[in-house]
Image (cartoon, grey):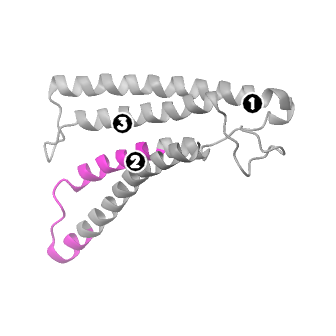
Amino acid sequence: MVKLPERVLHWSCGVLSAAGLFSIMWLTLLDVLGRKFLNHSIPGGLEITEMLMVVVIFGALPLVSWRGEHVVFDSLDSFIPHALKRLQARLVHAICAGFFFFLAKLMVQRGDRFTEYGDVTSHLQLAMAPVAYLMAALLVYTALVHVYFSVWPPVYVGHSDAEGSAQ
């Protein structure tokens, strides 16, 4: 049952982030070679890199949440009774889901504003609204991962809890 969501995340967000990072690598290589040998950089390279960074960072958020690779503050875990740890994990994931849904709402509003004003990048004149909407969609995807874990808390291997329960 757990393998299907993990596969979907891997083939959607994982491939998206990897493709973005791979594109940044090639763009940087070609830009440096162009500057070194042709005395000319790639026009709009910075703008393209910024947009690709959005793809890499926001595309990785659902995967980071799924795998539990985010920063964990477990300094109070020794004081929390073991019986409450699953409840704590559910509560934390529910709060995280709420925050990610809220951030997605803000990004949709920003995308709507970009669309309304016709905002584009300065050099290449690329529309900025699609980037904001992509960010919102990936934030919703991350929120859904946390909703999933608020119902079925994960067991992370290697965390400090001796029982291996979720944190």
Range of residues picked out in magenta: 32-60
Q: In the image, what residue type sits under mark 2?
A: Ser
Looking at the image, tell me whether mark 1 or mark 3 is earlier in sequence order: 1
Query: Rounded to the nearest whole Å, what is the CA distance between mark 3 and mark 2?
Result: 14 Å
Q: Mark 2 points at which residue?
A: 12
Q: What residue type is labelled 1?
A: Arg
Q: Do the residues labelled 1 and 2 touch (CB within 8 Å)?
A: no
Front disc: 3 or 2? 2
Residue at the disc numbered 3: 135
Q: Please name the amino acid that badge 3 sits on.
A: Met
Q: Is the magenta stretch mostly helix, strand or loop?
A: helix
Give the quadrant of the N terminus.
top right
Of the two numbered discs 3 and 2 on the same chain, state the one appearing first in sequence. Answer: 2
**Residue linked to disc 1:** 86
Is residue 161 toward the left or the right of residue 51 in the image? right
Measuring from the top left, give residue 24's x and y in whole percent: 32, 59
Crowding near the residue tagged with mark 2, few <14, some 14–19, many ≥20 C-alpha atoms within 10 Å: some
Query: Could you tell whether 99 is left or right of 56 in the image?
Result: right
Where's residue 55, x and y in %?
A: 35, 47
Q: Residue at x 78, y 31 (%)?
A: 85
SS state under label 1: helix
Residue located 19% across and 41% down the image: 121
Marker disc for residue 31: none
Which quadrant of the figure has residue 59? top left
Whole-percent x, y for residue 16 in the image: 37, 51
